[in-house]
Structure formats: C-alpha cells, structure tokens
C-alpha cells in the first residue's frame, strides 16, 4: 500500500514538473517576442486567427502609411458608425508583407499603392476587381544649398528643368512608384534627365535614398508623409517642391476571390470597396488631416462619378450586417 502511494506521488510530481516547464516556455516566448513593426497600430497576421474573428468584422490587409498616420482608424470608425461592421486589420506594413499575408487566406480586402504586387494578386486569381480609391503624394527634396534654386516651387516639371539646367545631381530610388512618377512627368513634358547627373538606385530602398542623396548633394523624390513626420531621416535635406498633382500616386482596393480562398466575406468586402469610392467618402478624404503635417490633407481623393451605395447592387442595410458567407 505504501509503495503504491509513493508511486502515485511520484507521478503527480512529474506531471506538475512538466506543466511548470511548459508554462515557463510559453511565457518566456511571450516575453522574448519581438514587437510588431514601428507603431502600436501595426499588427501581424500571425497574431490573430482569422477563423476565430467575429463575422461582423471585415478582415483587412492595409499598407503601412494608412495605419501609422491614424487615417485607417478614422476611416474604420466612420464605416462602423455607418454599417455596424468593424474593420479588423490582420496585416499592415510593407506591400510585399501584406500581399503574402493576403495570399495565405483569412483576409477579405487588401489595399496598397497601384503596383505590380497588387495586380499580380489579381492575375494569380487571389484577388478580384482592383479599383483606385485614394492617392498619396511625393515631394522633391534637396540639399539646403539648393543649387537649382527650386525651393518653394509647386510645378515639378519646371523644377526638373531647372535641376537639369544647373547640372545638379538627381537620385531616384528603387521604388517603382517613384520611378513611374518621374517618368510620367518627364514623358508628358518632353523632359530628358541628364544621364551624367542622374543616379538610379536599383537596390536601395526609400529609407536609404536620403542618405545617398545627401552624400551626393543631390535632389530626390520621397513620400511627403514619411518625410514630414520624420519616419524618413532628413539628414539635412530640405523640402523643395510639393503640391503638384502630378506627384500623386493612387491606392488600389481589391477583394479576395471566394473561388480560390475559403471563407471570404465577399458581399461585405464588395460593399466596403463601394463605400470607399462613394462621393461622401471621397469628400471626407479630401478634408481629412488638413493642418496635421502641413496645409494639405494627408491623402487625396480620386476623380470618379458613381451612384451612391444604396443605388448599387452591393447595398447593405445600415443596421444589419450581411451574411458573411455571401
């Protein structure tokens, strides 16, 4: 009897030891885990299991510029007030990261800059119906000495002509968006950049372009928002040219393809995409954030003419969310 009691006690001690060890491993992993990128608003898809999310939420992958500015939260609040549907950010950050999360499934909509990345999601059958709904903009920055004398200009084409005439160096980073904006301005205005004074960085991201441009005493193109709020190091570079609509880039919204990705809340996603493009939302975008970093809104509306949502086939009742399986 005593021997049997000792055996039972030993088994209990071993079981408790195993439980303590497992608990220690779990909490150690939590304590040592890296925080999600840069701001508290940035979430990673691995932190949330989409299958456990409430069905009155629309699951989103969002480019980082919309979340770190607070814009997406304001948009979410507006949409939830209107429909009762919450926007759940499951992935935000760089475009390649959110595209990867979107392909993995469990996300209903994705938005990022117009680019090969989002169009390839459509071409590969992961996403449907890509539509422009908003723009951000770039600015021309340069050294404080301003050899081309362009500071304060609002005409990018005229500024580029002065840069070329002054034989001042110009650096363009590897972002296809920046290169495309520059190419469009040059093509439309018959401008040819001086190859002897133009450097194209094939391998350097936007975060490094200012360092390289500063070292060369060169002008370059960067995003207005990250430069203005200090997410890009200025390293002595100054804002030279802004407020030219030709420096703007569109954002695209696309919905997950229910024929390829299981569990997509397709009707809800289509309704949200239509909401983004309706006149009232576009007017709100045109005013949002004025005075926050300068006298312009954070983002810019697109030129569209559409019927209101309640006249569209994607109509949802304002008080009763749709069946997410539809």
Image (cartoon, helix red, strand yellow):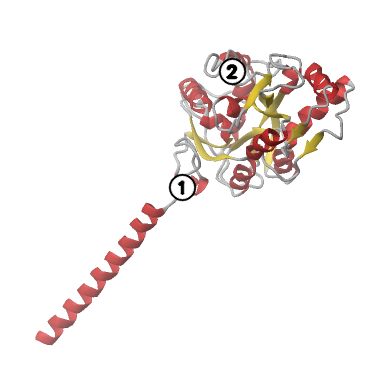
Expressed as whole percent of the image width and height from the top left, the position of residue 175 reads 71, 37
Quarter in which the N terminus is drawn: bottom left
Identify the residue position indicated by label 2 in the image.
Answer: 285
The front one of 142 and 257 is: 142
Which of pointers 1 and 2 lies earlier in the amino acid sequence? 1
Q: In this view, does 191 lie to the left or right of 155?
A: right
Figure label count:
2
Q: How crowded is mark 1: few (under 14 residues within 10 Å), some or many (20 or more)?
A: few
Q: Nearer the viewer, residue 67 or 234?
A: 234
At 82% from the left and 33% from the top, the residue drawn is: 197
Circles 1, 2 touching at the beta carbon (< 8 Å): no
Residue 185: x and y in percent read 81, 23
* Residue 288 location (% of width, % of height): 55, 17
Q: In this view, does 198 lie above or below 224?
A: below
Q: Residue at x 34, y 56 (%)?
A: 27
Relative image position of residue 133 (x, y in whole percent): 66, 24
Q: Quadrant of residue 214?
A: top right
Looking at this view, is 73 or 323 the one in front? 73
Whether residue 313 can be seen here: no
User: With respect to residue 245, does 25 lie above or below?
Assistant: below
Q: What element carries label 2?
A: helix
Q: Quadrant of residue 228?
A: top right
Q: Is residue 75 left or right of residue 135?
A: left
| Badge 2: residue crowd in 10 Å (few <14, some 14–19, many ≥20) | many
Mark 1 to mark 2 CA distance (whole Å): 30 Å
* Disc 1: which residue: 47
């Amino acid at each position: 009897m005593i021997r049997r009691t000792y055996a039972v006690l030993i088994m209990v001690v071993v079981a408790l030891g195993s439980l303590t060890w497992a608990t220690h491993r779990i909490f150690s992993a939590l304590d040592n885990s890296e925080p999600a990128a840069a701001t508290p608003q940035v979430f990673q898809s691995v932190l949330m299991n989409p299958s456990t999310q409430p069905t009155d939420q629309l699951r989103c992958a969002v480019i980082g510029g919309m979340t770190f500015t607070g814009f997406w939260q304001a948009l979410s609040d507006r949409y939830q007030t209107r429909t009762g549907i919450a926007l759940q950010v499951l992935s935000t950050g760089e475009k390649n990261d959110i595209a990867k999360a979107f392909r993995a499934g469990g996300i209903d909509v994705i938005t990022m800059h117009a680019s090969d990345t989002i169009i390839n999601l459509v071409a590969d059958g992961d996403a449907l119906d890509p539509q422009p709904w908003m723009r951000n903009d770039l600015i021309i920055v340069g050294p404080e000495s301003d050899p081309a004398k362009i500071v304060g200009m609002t005409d990018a084409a005229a500024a580029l002509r002065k840069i070329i005439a002054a034989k001042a160096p110009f650096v363009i980073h590897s972002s296809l968006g920046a290169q495309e904006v520059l190419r469009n301005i040059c093509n439309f205005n018959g401008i040819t950049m001086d190859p002897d004074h133009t450097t194209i960085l094939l391998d350097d991201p936007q975060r490094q372009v200012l360092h390289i441009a500063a070292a060369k005493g060169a002008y370059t193109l960067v995003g207005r928002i990250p430069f203005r709020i200090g997410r890009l190091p200025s390293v002595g570079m100054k804002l030279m040219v802004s407020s030219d609509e030709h420096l703007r880039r569109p954002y695209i919204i696309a919905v997950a393809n229910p024929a390829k990705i299981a569990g997509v809340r397709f009707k809800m996603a289509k309704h949200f995409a239509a909401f983004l493009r309706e006149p009232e939302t576009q007017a709100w975008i045109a005013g949002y954030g004025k005075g926050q970093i300068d006298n312009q809104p954070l983002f810019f509306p697109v030129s569209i003419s559409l019927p209101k949502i309640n006249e569209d086939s994607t109509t949802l009742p304002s008080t009763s969310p749709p069946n997410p399986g539809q």
